[in-house]
Every structure is written in structure tokens, then in C-alpha cells.
Amino acid sequence: MISTILVPLDGTKQSEKIIPHVHTLLKISDAEVTLLSVLEHEVDEDPVDWQDRNKYAKKNLERISEDLIGKGAKARFRILTGDPAEEIVLYADLHGPSLIAMTTHGRSGPVRWIRGSVAERVLRQSRVPILMVNPHTEEISVKSNHFKRILVPLDGSELAERALPLAKEFARAYDAELVLFHCEFVQEYPDVVVGRDHQLSQKILKPYYESLLREGFSVTTKTSFGLAADEILKAAVKEHVDLIALTTHGRMGFSRWLFGSTAEGVLRHCTCPVLVHRTAAFAVRKPEETWEEASVEERLGELSSHARIFK
């Protein structure tokens, strides 16, 4: 189970909205919590301002860690300097936490396009599972104070099913029901889905359903047609789930541009926490390497990783 939790905080109230979810995790796991703040240091920044920012970060982390310790948790904090996303990923690589828990600020429009989202950048690079929460919807997701229904989107690929082990851990810990979900990709929906059946989706979900039943889990299946991220969001609301557990294939370059990221689409608008496990779908090439510069083997590997989805 979860033994160590890394909690990135940036000093804003929005980022602290992950803390109630950390308390929820600690109710079923005696984990050690590391609070992490990363300060960006501008070359021409006034030294006094820099000291003030460090003092504020330390005071803020001390307050939160003392609150966690006061409630029986094991907690500590660290302050680092550098690019927030890069330092969070590097710290996780070096220290190997069981889970990263953080908010996504839900940026959109010019701010997101200029700076990007730290949460999304961490998501694209982290080898550690991440529990992400949109801070604008935290009141919806913590009402019951634990996870009763867990939605697990599956597309029939081995990559997608890698979300199941962690989902099963949460289901056991919280005595939760697993809701297996498959969306058949239909770009021109909704008109073309009239009269179509769900046999393909049911066929894909059946082996998982039967296996989980044999393991003693409470499990149901749900199916849909359309665009994956849209339909996952709709299913989360309709099925009243408290957590979504899914993988992101960590695609870069051409592949990611072509297929987009379902996980990121879900994260930006989801009304409940999302548990994301990043998988390596193909031979990794450098982020700055273009599709044209990649080797033939790398390009074939990227394309073949999608083959099962469209069979």
C-alpha cells in the first residue's frame, strides 16, 4: 500500500486544497508525507524579496506539517529552487514516493498556453502514480471523506489495464465498488451512434469484469460511444464516482499531437480526484526530438501502441 506521499505546494490556497485528500489517504495508510515547495529564482531578483519568499514558504510548510503531525501523521517538508515541474519530477525520481498528491490549478486560455500547467508537466514526466484534484471542485469530492465508487476507463490495451492494480488497492482499502468503463471511439457522434449496440465494449470489459469478480471485488461495467475524455467525464457524473483511476501513455511529439491526452482532458474538467499512472508506450525519445528525427523503430513503436484500440 502507499508508504510515502509527496505533496507539492506552491504557497497558494488552491494548492493546499489537496490536503483534505491527503488526510483521507492517511486514514487507510500510515504513510510518511513530504511537503515540497519549489521556488523559481530570477537572476535579477532583489535579495530581500528572495529571502522574504523563502521565509514565507518555510512558515507555510511548517504550519501544514505541524497540522498533519498534530493529527498523528508523519510529516516533513523541503524547499527547493528551480523550475517547479522539473524539480518535483527529479525529487520523485530520487526518493521514490509511492504517490504524488497535488492540485491542478485548472488554468485555461492565455495563462495556460504561455506557462503551461505544472501539474500537466509533472503528469507527462512522472514515473510515480499521481493523485490530482481540480481545486475548484474539491467540495464535491470530499463530502464522503473516502472513495466509494472508482471509475476505471479501459480501452482494451495492456497499457490502459495498468491502472487496475492501484485501483484495486484503493478498492480494497475503502471497500469501494469498481466501475469499469469503455468508450468506443466515434468522432462524428452523436448522430452515427443511433441504433448501434455495445457488443464491442462489452467484449473488451468482460475479461476484466469476470477476473475482478473472482477476486471478490464489487464491480459493474458501463459503456458509451464518442470521444474518450468527454465520455469519461459524463460517466463520472452519471455514476456518482468518487475517484477516476486511469493511465496516460506518456506520448510525445507526433503521437501525442495526433491522439491528444485523454488524461489531461479529464483532469482539466473533472469533478472528482483522478488517480493517474503514467506508462511508457514506446521507446522513449528526447522531448525536443521531432517525429521526423525519430528512428523508424521509434515511429513504428509509437503507432503500433495504438493498434489494439482501433481493431
Image (cartoon, rainbow, N blue to C red):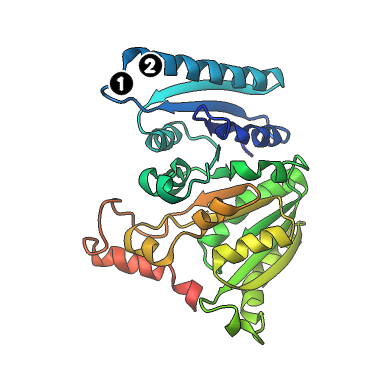
Task: Identify the residue shown where x is 48% and y is 35%.
Answer: 96
As drawn, 244 above or below 137: below
Left or right of residue 217, residue 168 in this image: left
Residue 185 x/y as whole percent: 54, 74
Q: Is residue 69 above or below residue 228?
A: above
Q: Residue furthest left?
A: 293
The location of residue 277, given as percent across then percent down, is 53, 50
Q: Amino acid at mark 2?
A: Asp
- Which quarter of the image is occupied by the N terminus? top right
Whether label 2 touches label 1, CB < 8 Å: yes
Mark on residue 49? 2
Assess disc 2: are there few (<14), some (14-19) or many (≥20) residues with their C-alpha within 10 Å of its C-alpha: few
Q: Nearer the viewer, residue 17 or 97?
A: 17
> At label 1, which amino acid type do we have?
Glu
Q: Is residue 189 above or below residue 96?
A: below
- Tell me the residue that label 1 is attached to: 45
Residue 219 appears at what percent x and percent y? 75, 61
Q: Quadrant of residue 201?
A: bottom right
SS type, badge 2: helix
Q: Is residue 214 above or below residue 134?
A: below
Please state which of residues 247 and 230 is positioned toward the viewer in this rendering: 230
